[in-house]
């Protein structure tokens, strides 16, 4: 999912499978999240320059405007297949959830020391994203209410943000101690149980971020990007991990796939549990 020619679109594996989600009368639209037969994103409608949180179920005719009344801008960035999550400017930016209608909008902003908040990833029963304090952005986890918010900023990290979740594994970025700039990370069950995915990249990569995660039987796939300092270009990466013996919630170092060139080669690190595969 994404957009084509400024209109939200959905693909099912081939260019020819594209479905324009629209709506056709919108000035522009983008699909930002998908799970099952549900897509979410934003739409700019005639009469207003501001984006509106949007929901589709595979067709342009299924469009639902989720934007709450008396607010300015909104985006739906994630769905668990039933509920939708994202943010609303109230005018401060607050994390929000919906149950397929604008009237169901639920404010999940944690308040207290947090000035703004956003949801970027969802799985059944859990939402992930981040909230800002005077000390910077903090990765956060919700369970459907504002009061359930948990600050998952890694110990010693200067900032962090979660982008996606399987329900048990959360991925995103963090300013880890000793690192220069942001590092792709995976959280495994607690704020302190964190895997530095950036450490598995070749040494010429600077900034990195994990954007999506999928967990299947005996394997975990994480995708994101890294900045190549040698070529000043951004490359797509895939991290592949397996559960540790006796601890299914733990992720071992895995293979890394970088989409760069047509001819693949592999480079194995000095350890026997990880490798880097560049394509």
Image (cartoon, rainbow, N blue to C red):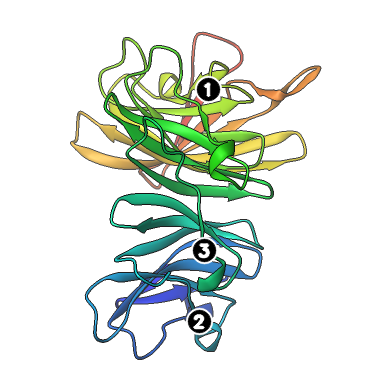
Q: Quadrant of residue 53?
A: bottom left
User: How far from the left and from the top, in percent, is residue 80?
Assistant: 63, 56
Residue that mark 2 sits on: 63
Residue that mark 1 sits on: 275
Q: Quick one: 142 or 28, which is closer to the camera?
A: 142
Instruction: Kindly identify the residue that appears in the image at 69 percent across and 35 percent down.
Output: 219
Seen in the image, is 115 located left or right of residue 221?
left
Q: Alpha carbon of mark 2 to alpha carbon of mark 1: how far?
A: 44 Å
Instruction: Kindly identify the residue that appears in the image at 75 percent across and 33 percent down.
Output: 218
- Few, some or many residues within 10 Å of mark 3 (<14, 14–19, 20+): some
User: How far from the left and from the top, in percent, is residue 210?
Assistant: 44, 37
SS at mark 1 in the image:
strand
Regarding residue 279, the answer to whether it shows in the image is: no
- Mark 3 and mark 2 in contact (Cβ < 8 Å)? no
Image quadrant occupied by the C terminus: top left
Q: Alpha carbon of mark 2 to alpha carbon of mark 3: how far?
A: 16 Å
Q: Quadrant of residue 43?
A: bottom left
Q: Alpha carbon of mark 3 to alpha carbon of mark 1: how far?
A: 45 Å
Mark 2 or mark 1, whichever is nearer to me: 2
User: How far from the left and from the top, in percent, is residue 19?
Assistant: 50, 81
Regarding residue 43, the answer to whether it shows in the image is: yes
Mark 3 or mark 1, whichever is nearer to me: 3
Residue that mark 3 sits on: 105
Dot 2 or dot 1: first in sequence order is 2
- Few, some or many residues within 10 Å of mark 1 (<14, 14–19, 20+): many
Q: Quick one: 214 or 30, which is closer to the camera?
A: 30
Dot 2 or dot 3: first in sequence order is 2
- Few, some or many residues within 10 Å of mark 2 (<14, 14–19, 20+): some
SS at mark 3 in the image:
loop
Instruction: Kindly identify the residue that appears in the image at 37 percent across and 34 percent down.
Output: 114
């Amino acid at each position: 999912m994404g957009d084509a020619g400024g209109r939200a679109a959905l693909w099912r594996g081939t260019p020819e499978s594209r479905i324009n989600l629209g709506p056709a009368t919108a000035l522009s639209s983008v699909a930002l999240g998908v799970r099952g037969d549900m897509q979410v994103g934003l739409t700019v409608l005639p009469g207003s320059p501001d984006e509106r949180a949007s929901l589709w179920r595979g067709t342009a005719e299924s469009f639902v405007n989720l934007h709450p009344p008396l607010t300015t801008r909104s985006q739906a960035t994630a769905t668990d297949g039933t509920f939708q999550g994202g943010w609303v400017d109230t005018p401060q930016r607050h994390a929000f959830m919906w149950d397929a209608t604008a009237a169901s909008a639920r404010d999940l902003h944690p308040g207290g020391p947090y000035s703004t908040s956003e949801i970027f990833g969802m799985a059944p029963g859990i939402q992930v994203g981040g909230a800002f304090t005077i000390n910077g952005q903090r990765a956060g986890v919700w369970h459907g209410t504002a009061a359930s918010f948990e600050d998952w900023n890694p110990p010693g990290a200067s900032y962090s943000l979660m982008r996606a979740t399987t329900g048990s594994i959360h991925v995103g970025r963090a300013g880890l101690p000793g690192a220069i700039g942001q590092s792709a990370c995976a959280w495994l069950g607690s704020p302190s149980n964190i895997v530095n995915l950036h450490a598995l990249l070749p040494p010429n990569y600077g900034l990195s971020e994990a954007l999506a995660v999928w967990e299947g039987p005996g394997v975990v796939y994480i995708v994101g990007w890294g900045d190549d300092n040698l070529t000043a270009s951004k490359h797509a990466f895939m991290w592949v991990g397996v559960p540790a013996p006796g601890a299914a919630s733990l992720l071992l170092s895995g293979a890394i796939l970088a989409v760069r060139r047509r001819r693949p080669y592999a480079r194995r690190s000095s350890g026997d549990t990880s490798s880097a595969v560049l394509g």
